Image: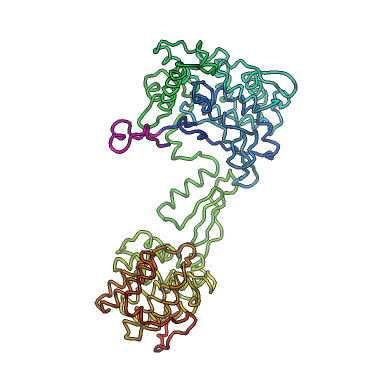
Amino acid sequence: MIERLGALDGARARRDLGEFLRQGNVDYASEGTTWASHENYLCWMSPLELRPRLMPHLVSRIVFTGGGGFDPFDTSRPRFVLSPRLLFMRQGVAEVCGGRGLVDPKNEPLCAGFHRQHLICGDSLRGHLGTFLRLGTTALVIGLVEARCEGDPDVKLASPLAALSTITRDVSLGKRLRLANGRYATALAIQRHYLLRARRNLEVLPDWASAVCDVWQETLDRLLSGVDAVADRLDWAIKFTVYRNRATRRGMSWPSRRSVMTGLAPRGAARAATTGWRAELCELDTRFGQLYPPGLFDALDEAGVLQHRVPGVIDVDRAVTCPPAQGRAFVRGTVITRLAAAGDAWICAWDGISDLLSMAHLDLSHPFVEQEQWSGCLDDPRITLARRIVSLARSHDAASTGPSIRECAESLCEPSARVLRRHMAHFAVDLNDSGVGRRGEGRLEDAEWLIRTALAINIDVLTDTSPLIPHRRCNLATVLLLQGRLDEALEQLELAWQAIGSQYNVTTARILTVRLAVALLRGEAPEFFVGQLKSHLAIHLLRPFPRHETRSATGQVFESLGARFSDADLALLMQIMAVLNTDQPVESLDEHPRWQEAEAVPLAAPWPATQAFLDVLPW
């Protein structure tokens, strides 16, 4: 999380406190804010059966997974707790995904033949040991539960949430928890139970289980000796020791201060002193989690006073970019690396990788797949051209080598390429938008053929009533206008109007405006089209449609053609565009004589007949 400390602003804040990156589980400055370190485990057992049987472990593992800190709900006293994050848990199994429960109900396997258990009750830690044990022991306990070897009745808690509250506030780790069978056990005893079960059932667990058990046992043995025995390796114990040392330097004996350790509220003048003391400790807590620039934890680690690293855990930095050698992560990573330069024509999900153009699909639904198995590839030699035009559209490169945008587009617009065009549906918006961008750059041939390709794709994949098709035709018409090809522009506008002309929306208003411009350029009487616009703009508000540009740059087209319009006509066109872009009210058009004099014409009235259109493809 990025934070700026204090209420300072501007240069002073950057000079005095600056911005920093920190890792944490709660925000002491804002009530109710908390973050988790999420966990996911691949499971065979149904989540409905698995979840309640995980409760004893999830509650008791706090003794080595707790991040440490202060009770976020007690703003007057610095009451130390093993895990501030877990004080936000209000349910055993959350009722909805994202709810604050020990176990999250999310059930998205993201693979075939397995379940996935998602947990959000874990603390984000700086030390390696706590994270190693959090993931390693929980995976082993799930393995024991699935093998029905965990001995659940022996450690089932009478009330997991009550036990959670007790353990979180028990720095001594000695308080006993009531079990469902009427007996009592400490958190350490419950963890020792799971450790012994794992030792006795190594044959049903992964081959790394024994190594985890060794670290698990050593940590539990140390915890039996108290906080000082783990003060150099577990996050909560490191923090507790740092805070205790700070109290000593201030002349306090922290363990004997009832207002600090037990949470008894101080009175009178002591209240203000305690509040300031809490703020000081909360700042220390923030500095402990500081990642950049390096904070308190990093200073302690660099000084060599911490022993949080786990023997045998190496190449952590390499693991950030290199997936494990087994399973679908390796296959996925290898393919992504190979195809990265191909751009957005490829999409990747947990269970597969697909080529949006050729429809080739790599099935990764099984989590332990070892080889690439592609299927469904479209056999069309023009796929390379499709990939190239998409790449050129997104890169905006002139691309001096290889087929041009026009060459690609002409091939893709052939009737025989219809199947491929349907596969390109995902790219129609990008091609159109890139064409409009090239229009603004004056690269008119590229603009024309990018928009033509987008139009051809939309004609194949959308219904006749879709407003996107007339929208594309209007864009194409503006490019043709700039090229001086008025008859072709007029044909596109006629086709667009036939499809959408009776509707009151932004697209019809833009088509009418461009048609008015064509009439002015061709020397036609413009009153009819001004009259239709007058009827159209009397309807408020103009309805857009999804993914429609909120603003139109057609005014730039009119400005480029400015020498071919009279000053008054150009002013009218620009004012209409200002109204369509909601920069000016409709009433502002009343200052233009043509607008004042025109009689309103219904949108349903047919356009005046024009000369025969050129015999060209419908796109």
Q: Which quadrant, please, contains the N terminus?
A: top left
542 and 94: which is toward the camera: 542
Percent position of residue 196, x then y: 65, 21
Quadrant of the rendered image containing residue 483: bottom left
Residue under the point 47% across and 69% down: 468
Image-based side of 412 in relation to 402, left or right: right
Q: Which quadrant, please, contains the C terminus?
A: bottom left
423 and 457: which is toward the camera: 457
Q: Residue furthest front?
A: 268
Is 38 drawn above or below residue 507 in the view shown?
Answer: above
21 and 589: which is toward the camera: 589
Percent position of residue 38, x then y: 54, 36
Question: Colour mode?
Answer: rainbow
The image shows a total of numbered marks equal to 0
290 and 50: which is toward the camera: 290
Percent position of residue 385, x then y: 41, 66
Residue under the point 57% across and 21% down: 169
Residue 285: say if magenta: no
Write down the region rendered in magenta.
Answer: 2-21
Q: Residue furthest left?
A: 563
Is 607 drawn above or below residue 12 in the view shown?
Answer: below
Percent position of residue 380, x then y: 49, 67
Image-based side of 219 in relation to 412, left or right: right
Image-based side of 2 in relation to 110, left or right: left
Residue 8: say if magenta: yes
Is 12 drawn above or below residue 453 in the view shown?
Answer: above
Is 478 drawn above or below residue 105 in the view shown?
Answer: below
Residue under the point 43% across and 79% down: 532
